[in-house]
Amino acid sequence: MTATAITFIVYLAVMMAIGIITYKMTNTLSDYVLGGRQLGSWVTAFSAAASDFSGWLLIGLPGAAYASGMGQWSLWIAVGLAVGATINWTYVAKRLRVYTEYSKDSITLPEFFENRFRDHSNSLRVISALFILVFFLFYTASGLVAGAKLFQGTFGMGYQVALVVGALIIVSYTFLGGFLAVSYTDFIQGFLMFLALLFTSIYGLIEIGGFGGLFNALGSIDESLLNAFQGTSYDQPGGVLWEAAGPIGFIGIISAVAWGLGYFGQPHILARFMAIRSHKEIRKARLISVSLGLVLPLYSALIVGMLGIVTFDTPLEDPEQVFIQLVQFVYNPWIAGALLAAVLAAIMSTVDSQLLVSSSALSEDFYRKYLRKDASENELVWVGRISVLVIAIIALFLAWNENSSVLDLVSYAWAGFGATFGPAILFSLFWKKTSRNGILAGIIVGGITIFTWQYTGSALYEMVPGFLFSSIAIILFSLIGQGPSDEVKEEYDKVAGVK
């Protein structure tokens, strides 16, 4: 415990040092929100991956694999995410980087939508910012829950105490350094996550005799753990461990793969595309992010969860503790401390990004737009910092219930952003006939669908109908209403012609 605590303290000291250094480099709102668009390809790649995965990569996804093996939907989620992220980097990243600079140097998504379609009513900006704030509250809450589970499982803290400790740590350096602090710490955190999952999965496979040994051990527990089309029931408190729960079915597979659609609308990931130094560095960043930051960690997380099934004699009451308990069981305290610091890194790397995007929505899209149009850059930076504190406090209350599930909270927020902004981003970047009314209708329809779909009783993941209905709304309202102006069309052609 002492070794683990020392490792944590050293890690946190480094993160705070970065926050203090970047505090001195943050002078304007553009610096605070996008780092002055000066990120290199390596920092962009790993910070995008780190802000994407968060605590659910080391807590939520291994927990799902621990509870169901290859069954249920954990494997299909990994497939959908790998495909979605690759498409996002390949087609969206470059176009968004170029377009946000062409459209009056837009530094937030709401500002981009407003400038892209010359929306003088401010409706696009306000409604976009409102949806960002709402869904990020749930997303930030999921990160705080993950942090609480980490401190709870590592140091034996009470849940609420662990929750407050984790929140204080994350908010402190985000408050100080803004986007530069978030991006540079995310680079370190993303690399730590990659190493932690890769080493743990490789070490575990060597110990058990490779994939053959792992699959044989899983099969001896229950064959459904090896069947990607078979559901698995896990109910340790009820006396049942792992047993077959029937076929997943078409709806289950589609719902899991549809997680990949969420990438096109995640503001904290899209912000990395907007902040890279040049669109010409996107190709290199894509290669780094997809291979090292995405595919290997994703499937390593699944392996870690399945290794947990065959490692512990007594099944875990909370499957989402599997990585935390596994590294403490397998490694000496110093190595375990470093790997558990990677869990904290995963959590911090996403929550800080979410807090930052939310604060930018308040400072840039509300405060400067409506309250203080002539506010100085220094004033806006401080408004952003105060917004970080306010949003973190609200998220803390949402996360207060110790029965909260990391994956459930992430699932809802991920669907919210994917359906609300995913189609809007794609049509804004790639369809010349897209109109202001079309985008406004798409954002509203996508968001409302996410809020209301649960009342239909359907097992289909709300991302699917939300994304579909939003796309249909954009097409219909763009075709039947007033189309884009000549100025908007000319700008589209200029962006499309950038090599």
Image: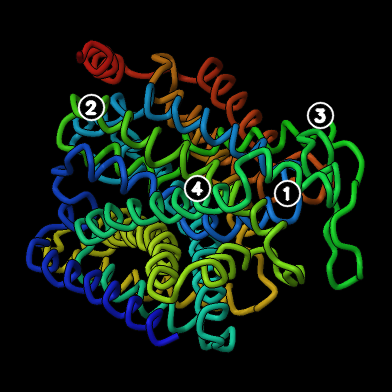
Amino acid type of the residue that numbered disc 4 sits on in the rendered structure = Ile
Q: Marks 2 and 4, how far apart in space?
A: 40 Å
Is residue 160 visible in this depiction of the protein?
Answer: yes
Instruction: Name the secondary structure under disc 3.
Output: helix
Q: Which residue is mark 2?
A: 98
> At x 45% / y 48%, what residue is drawn?
198
Asked if the residues shown at circle 3 and circle 1 are in contact, with their CB atoms under 8 angstroms apart, the answer is no
Which residue does the numbered mark 3 point to in the structure image?
250
Using the image as rendered, state which of residue 384 and residue 402 is in the foreground.
402
Residue where numbered disc 4 is placed: 202
Above-or-below relation of 94 to 417: above
Q: Residue at x 60, y 57 (%)?
A: 60
**Could you tell me which quadrant the N terminus lies in?**
bottom left
Observer-side mark, 2 or 4, equals: 4
Pointer 3 or 1: first along the chain = 3
Please identify the quadrant where the C terminus is shown.
top left
Q: Check the image and report above or below for 143 versus 91.
A: below
Distance between mark 3 and mark 1 Cα atoms? 22 Å
Q: Secondary structure at mark 1?
A: helix
Marked residue nearer the N-terminal end (1 or 2):
2
Of label 4 and label 3, which has the lower sequence position?
Answer: 4
Q: How many C-alpha atoms fall within 10 Å of the one at disc 4: few (<14), some, or many (≥20)?
A: some
Q: Amino acid at mark 3?
A: Phe
Q: Is residue 124 above or below residue 425?
A: below
